[in-house]
Image (cartoon, helix red, strand yellow):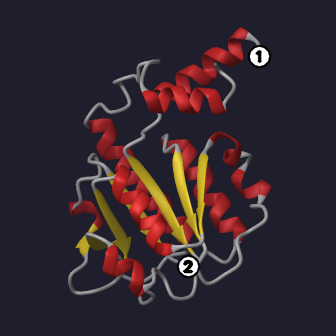
Amino acid sequence: MNEVRREKLDRVLRKRQFDITVVMENVHDPHNISAVMRTCDAVGIQEIYVLNTSIRPHKRFGAKSSSSAAKWLTVHHFTDLDKCVQTLKEKYQKIFTTHLSEKSVDLYSMNLTESIALVFGNEHEGVSADFRDRADGNFIIPQVGIIQSLNISVACAVTIYEAYRQKQLANHYETARSVEDPAYKATAAEWGLQ
């Protein structure tokens, strides 16, 4: 690896946000997953979770829609809801699912600078009741149209760009990661920097 490439990867890795993640539950279209990956990479989210409990795991994701983002992300695959939730709770302080209900909070009232896992459901039923029961709460993206839902990749983009905005205001991207940080080290090894 040449020095210019090494410096670019180091610069990107130092801005990665290891305290926020995206979870996609039973998403049918692999291109939607790929589009989410691309957006996660754009805002510095390193880890994502793909949970398949009612559909077959995807063999591969849409290369065109991800623009090779999967290569730079740490993707965790699960087929068991309890194991997925347990892993999330060990790493993140809160789990919030997208779900339209009376108890749902508005995306723009959430503190997305804290340690959080954001769960998005599939194109047909949304997040399952089983996952919602294990979460700390639900959130909605405010809308004024007739159809009260967005495509998963769009909903995810809107949500994590709000997280990006909040994290920028809180200087999370200006506080560069130390090369001694365990998350930095693990990702640097995945990327071939060490």
* Left or right for 62, reference 51: right
Could you tell me residue 89's position as x and y percent? 34, 58
Could you tell me residue 46's position as x and y percent? 52, 43
- Secondary structure under tag 1 reads loop
- In this rendering, is residue 11 above or below 186? above
Q: Which residue does the image show at 78% across and 65% down from the upper left? A: 59
Q: Quadrant of residue 7?
A: top right
Q: Which mark is residue 136?
A: none
Residue type of the residue flagged with mark 1: Met
- Secondary structure under tag 2 reads loop
Q: Which mark is residue 122?
A: 2
* Left or right for 5, reference 93: right
Q: Nearer the viewer, residue 167 or 138?
A: 138
Q: Quadrant of residue 152?
A: bottom right
Q: Which mark is residue 1?
A: 1
Farthest residue to the top: give it. Answer: 3
Q: Tag 2: Cα neighbours inside 10 Å, few (<14), some, or many (≥20)? A: some
Q: Nearer the viewer, residue 111 or 60?
A: 60
Quadrant where the N terminus lies?
Answer: top right
Q: Which residue does the image show at 50% across and 76% down from the upper left? A: 121
* Left or right for 168, reference 56: left
Residue type of the residue flagged with mark 2: Asn
Q: Which residue does the image show at 52% across and 48% down from the upper left? A: 47
